[in-house]
Image (cartoon, helix red, strand yellow):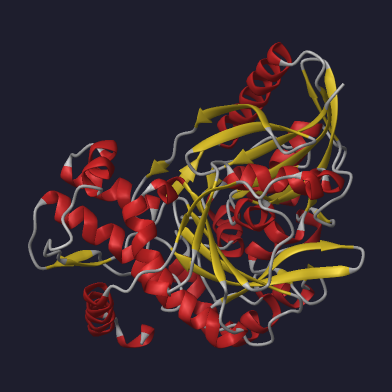
Amino acid sequence: MTRAVLALDQGSHASRACIYDEAGVLCAAHTVPVATRHIDARHIEQDADELLRSLQSAAQAAVRTALQQRPQLQLVAAGLAVQRSTIVCCTRAGVPLGPALSWQDRRNDTWLQTLAPQQSRIREITGLPLSAHYGASKLRWCLEHLPAVSAAAQRADLLAAPLASFLGLRLTGASAARIDPANAARTLLWDSRQLDWSEELLQLFALQRAWLPRCAPTCADYGALEIDGQVLPLRALTGDQSAMPFASGAPDNDTLYVNLGTGAFIQRPLAARPPAPAPLLGSVLCSDAAGARYTLEGTVNGAGSAVSWFCASENLDEATLWAALETLGATAQLPIFLNGVGGLGSPWWCAQFTPHFIGAGTALERFAALIESIAFMIAINAQLLAQQAGTARALLLAGGMSRSGWLCRRLAALLQLPISVLAAEASARGVAALAAPAWVTRWSAGITRVYHPQADHALQARYQLFQECLNAALPDSAR
């Protein structure tokens, strides 16, 4: 009988369930799309119950497929990775009191700016900049604008839950909600040194500890899931980006990890808490009884979301554009795209920035300029990571956009690093490794392609031009 682990990955566009056996072989996988409501540029939300149901449906389908193909398979554990910074206000039993406010949502940005005088202290405690993408300002908005949330708070029945906590509670039916460090850290309420909620920040945001889930290590007993009569202990809880560095084994401090999803996230693992991460993020990768492991992290807000924005505005088919991109000649004269889709992430932290092209071009050339802008912004973050943590030796790339050889070749040339591309579902594979750590030494690295850096002087010149154009367009506050 072969043992296996169930990995659940709840992302912005879909919920995925993957089953890996002891050798790290993917036995079955199922994906269920989920909807996102873009009410306007700042109000972006999802249906919390839909996210839950999609995970349950994906898990059930994956388990059934795996057992049909391999009847002797024994599922022994589960792990859950979710989109960080998404918030659900619910009752203590897990009944939603409003929508899930997406990590992309920044509806309370104006209010949050009233705390600007405290932003240095907030970054000192959390490792993060003052940003409405994170959970605290969203919780304040819910308390002030959703009567059901304020009523639950008054009757001591409110759970102000990072999405991971809400899903973990409902999937397992546990008696109390818990939260892991990677997701707790994305609220602006968590002390990354003490590995607990910060009383100082709770007072600053006028929030109560009693409303929040109890903190637990990354790998802990989070309850049990029941799927088709099988009971699986939930052994790991983390964020999707925090799971990705575990997909190919233990995270390597000399490697850059880049995950290309709705946003692009660039990470460099660290053994110790970064004392002064600005203008990057000081994030928590995982924790156990011995303490925490950290990362320096950069964020490009407009990755997959920028592609969706372009396809919708141009009324073009995404798959057709990706295929055509591989045929684009090396001498094509591309415009410059200043990628402010979703606002500018690190190192600018500019929530309001209108995306626009400089120069003309065909639809394909504009699409290429957009993809190139993602590579440029990753390169800017990689340079800042090198300044703080030393030069990296390699880059490990994951996410849907990593299938583009055009993009990978440009990243390798810009960074002058070998790029290894992980097999699909890197976040799921990473959380599977966390849920069954004893198996990982027998797993392959899961690399599908490797791109070696080539000199590209024209690309380097465009990279310089991109930076000059972006700097000229930035408001004074972001320079």
- Residue ID at (79%, 47%): 440
Residue 441 x %, y %: 80, 50
- Residue ID at (29%, 37%): 319
Quarter of the C terminus within the rendering: bottom left
Residue 156 in sight in this render:
no
Residue 382 in sight in this render:
yes
Residue 49 x %, y %: 60, 31
Instruction: State left or right for residue 171 relative to residue 297.
Output: right
Residue 369 x %, y %: 22, 61
**Can you tell which quarter of the image residue 474 is in?**
bottom left
- Residue ID at (44%, 40%): 36
In this view, the residue in front, 417 or 85, is 417
Quarter of the N terminus within the rendering: top right
Count of numbered labels shown in the rendering: 0
Residue 263, relative to residue 319: is it above or below?
below
Residue 225, relative to residue 476: is it above or below?
above
- Residue ID at (30%, 58%): 371
In this view, the residue in front, 457 or 81, is 457
Residue 70, relative to residue 330: is it above or below?
above
Residue 420 x %, y %: 52, 57
In this view, the residue in front, 56 or 368, is 368
Residue reaching furthest right? 289
Instruction: State left or right for residue 340 relative to residue 102.
Output: left
**Can you tell which quarter of the image residue 390 is in?**
bottom right
Instruction: State left or right for residue 338 relative to residue 438.
Output: left
